[in-house]
Amino acid sequence: MMEKICVIGLGYIGLPTSIMFAKHGFQVHGMDVNEKAVATLAKKQLHIEEPGLQEALEEVMDSGNLSVSTEPQEADVFIVAVPSPIREDKTANLDYVRTATESIVPYIKKGNLVILESTVPPRTVEDVMLPVLEKTGLKLGEELYVSHSPERVIPGKIFQELVSNDRIVGGIDPTSSELTKKLYKSFVEGEIHLTDATTAEMVKVIENTYRDVNIAFANEIAKISDRIGINGWEAIKLANYHPRVNIHQPGPGVGGHCIAVDPWFLAELQPDIAKIITLARHTNDDMPAYTVDKIKQLTEGITNPKVALLGLSFKGNVDDMRESPSLTIMEHLNKEGISYKVFDPHIKDVRVPHQVLSLQEVIEEADIAVILTDHKIFKEYHPEEVGQAMNRRVVFDTKNLLDEIDWREAGFQFIRLGDAKNR
């Protein structure tokens, strides 16, 4: 019987997953080493932003189905949902996965199931988790079951996609796979596809690497379009009318905990083979510098130009700054000695230098406004009101978010990344 679940990690994936199982009748205990996050959750308050999460948290805590602390508890199932970031040298840091696995060893009993949800390099279950789990003294695949079932959701739609998306389950043996499938079938309406653990790890990394390579292609199209005098966004849109073409969108860089990280896992494993993957990563990592070069061109001739950056999170309508290109753009501006302020309506507390908490503060006396994140609210700003607060009416849209005609009619010089057609 799988009645109690212990989830290790209460971040963007672990917390919604805990809540989803709790909503479906399981007794769930969530643990995290972040004492502040645990204390916040214990008060039924959130430390992350996600639509529907607050109401769901209150529901499952009021029902008694979800508890939180900084220590694991005995359970039938242990789910590890901790970060697997990259180091500065672009190698995988699996310390969180290893430490999380070690933390549950004293609580594991015969017949338990351990699931890794974190996105990791292939062979992490085999090479990192299993040696730790052997310390339980239980025979793997007979007395203790282990699998990998990577999350496949996007911030802003996590609850919907946890239910509707197909899921990959890779066990170290058939029984591990079947037990994991049975568990997730409690709420997953999509298909659940079974394989082995290493293949499941590879599948998730492939998915995000595909998107990264595709975005790198789009960014090259944007650069080429800028050089030859056309609108790259229009060209991509028209090309995508072909039934077998699906080009992604260019932008100021790639962020998030997956797409900006996972391709390095493959590059690290097989550097002599992963040539396209590595080139795509470098292409996307170079986009913040390319964006700053454009800002420099657009403010050339201005003494001590002031730049208004709109957007800190890596994608629209969320508060997630992990690997955000906005942060790298700010680093480049610092090196160039260019004055700037940054504003993000989804990030309320001041976490980074030069951050302000209102539109008025960020655009006041600015010489250029730069859209870095496609937040819906940015589309709703009135160009005339924005222009009145600025020194110069110049807007640089790196996300193809704004209505060009509206901004031009308000007297703005309108520049779009990858679009040289109407300059």
Image: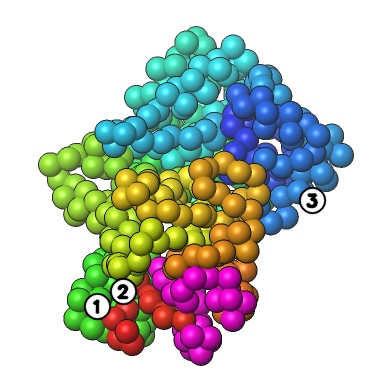
Colour convention: rainbow
Other residues around mark 3 within 10 Å, as few (<14) / some (14–19) / many (≥20): few
Q: Is residue 122 shown left or right of residue 37?
A: left
- The location of residue 139, given as percent across then percent down, is 47, 16
Q: Is residue 92 visible?
A: no
Q: Which residue is mark 1?
A: 225
* Chain-order first, disc 2 or disc 3: 3
* Chain-order first, disc 2 or disc 1: 1
Q: Quadrant of residue 93?
A: top left
Residue extent of the magenta highlight: 384-411
Q: Which residue is mark 2?
A: 418
- Which quadrant holds the N terminus? top right
Calculate the distance from the C-alpha at mark 2 to the C-alpha at mark 3: 41 Å
Q: Is residue 57 above or below residue 161?
A: above
Q: Nearer the viewer, residue 223 or 106?
A: 223
Residue most extreme to the left: 272
On residue 55, the disc is 3
